[in-house]
Structure formats: C-alpha cells, structure tokens
Image: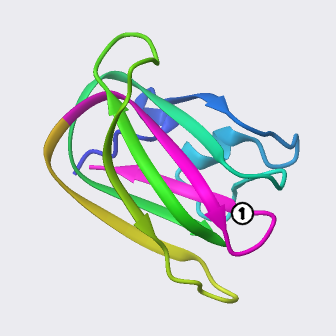
C-alpha cells in the first residue's frame, strides 16, 4: 500500500496556521509518530498537505493528541483554493496516549488536503502523523 502523505513520496505541508521551530509542520508527514507539529493555542488551527500528483484515496489515518473536532477538505486543482468538505469527526478524548482516527473514503481523488482543527480538549493540540492510502 502506497502512503501518499509522506515527504519521501513528495508530499509537502504548504501551510500551517501556527509553527514552533522545535515542532514544525513537516513532522506531520515524516512517517514518525514520535515527532509532531504542535499548535500555538487558538482555534481553529489548520494545515494543508500537497501531493506530488493527484492521489486516489480510500483511507486517511491521523494520529493526534487533544484534538476534539476535525474537518478534512480536498481539492483537485494545482493551487490550494476552492476546497470541498469530505469528512468531519469529533474525536474521543484519550488522556495520556495518542488518538488514532481512520476516515474511510469512497475512492476520492485530491491534489491537496486541508485539515481544520475546530476545537481541542486543551489549549494546545498536536498532530503526529497523517497517512493517506
């Protein structure tokens, strides 16, 4: 199974609403759940992943901490505009360990994914990895 949302596959985080030099947004797509991107405390928070080419997706998995509500949007153009909602979910609070959430999709295609964290269980949230299959 090909994981399209990895920097080694050509994916890039082209926008992040906040950034800390010790926990940069690029950590989301490095394939390591030990590294992460952390928000700076206000909501909503968002980040956009660009794929090296259009990707057909059937499953998105996100590992995070303290995320309460997440929206995932996509587009199929060459620029990161005009997104459409593909799914949204309220995450279960998992005190002391990572949240792992799967989003089953019906074979949709995208060039960009926008992840919008609309609320958290704390002031700060972290995203450890995003996997797209």
Q: Residue at x 69, y 58 (%)?
A: 35
> Foreground residue, 128 or 74?
74
Q: Residue at x 26, y 45 (%)?
A: 2
Q: Is residue 30 at least partly visible in the picture?
A: no
23 sits left or right of 47 in the view: right
Q: Which of the colour schemes (rainbow, by chain, secondary structure, one colour) is used?
A: rainbow
Q: Residue furthest left?
A: 106
Q: Is residue 12 above or below residue 4?
A: above
Can I make out residue 71 in this image?
A: yes
> Who's the residue at 64% across and 62% down the image?
119
Residue 113 location, quadrant: top left
- Please, what secondary structure does the residue beneath circle 1 have? loop
**Foreground pick, 132 / 91:** 91
Direction from residue 18 to residue 85 in the image, left or right: left
The answer to whether residue 40 is above or below residue 19 is below
**Residue that numbered label 1 is attached to:** 125
Dominant secondary structure, magenta: strand
Number of labels in the image equals 1
Q: Name the image quarter holding residue 54.
A: top left
Is residue 118 in the magenta section?
Answer: yes
Viewer-side residue, 1 vs 42: 42
Pointer 1 local density, CA inside 10 Å: few below 14, some 14–19, many at least 20? many
Residue 112 among those drawn in magenta: yes
Q: Which residues are magenta?
A: 109-133
List x then y, in percent, for residue 130.
47, 52
Horizontal and vertical percent position of residue 41:
83, 56
């Amino acid at each position: 199974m090909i994981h399209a949302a990895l920097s080694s596959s050509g994916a890039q985080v082209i926008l992040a609403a906040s950034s800390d030099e010790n926990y940069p947004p690029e950590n989301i797509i490095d394939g390591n759940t030990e590294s992460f991107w952390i928000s700076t405390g206000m909501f909503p928070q968002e980040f956009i992943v660009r794929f090296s080419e259009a990707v057909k997706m059937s499953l998105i998995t996100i590992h995070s901490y303290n995320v309460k509500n997440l929206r995932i949007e996509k587009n199929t153009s060459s620029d990161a505009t005009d997104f459409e909602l593909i799914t949204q979910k309220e995450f279960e609070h998992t005190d002391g360990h990572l949240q792992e959430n799967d989003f089953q999709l019906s074979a949709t295609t995208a060039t960009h994914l926008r992840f919008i964290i609309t609320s958290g269980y704390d002031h700060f949230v972290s995203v450890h990895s995003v996997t797209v299959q």
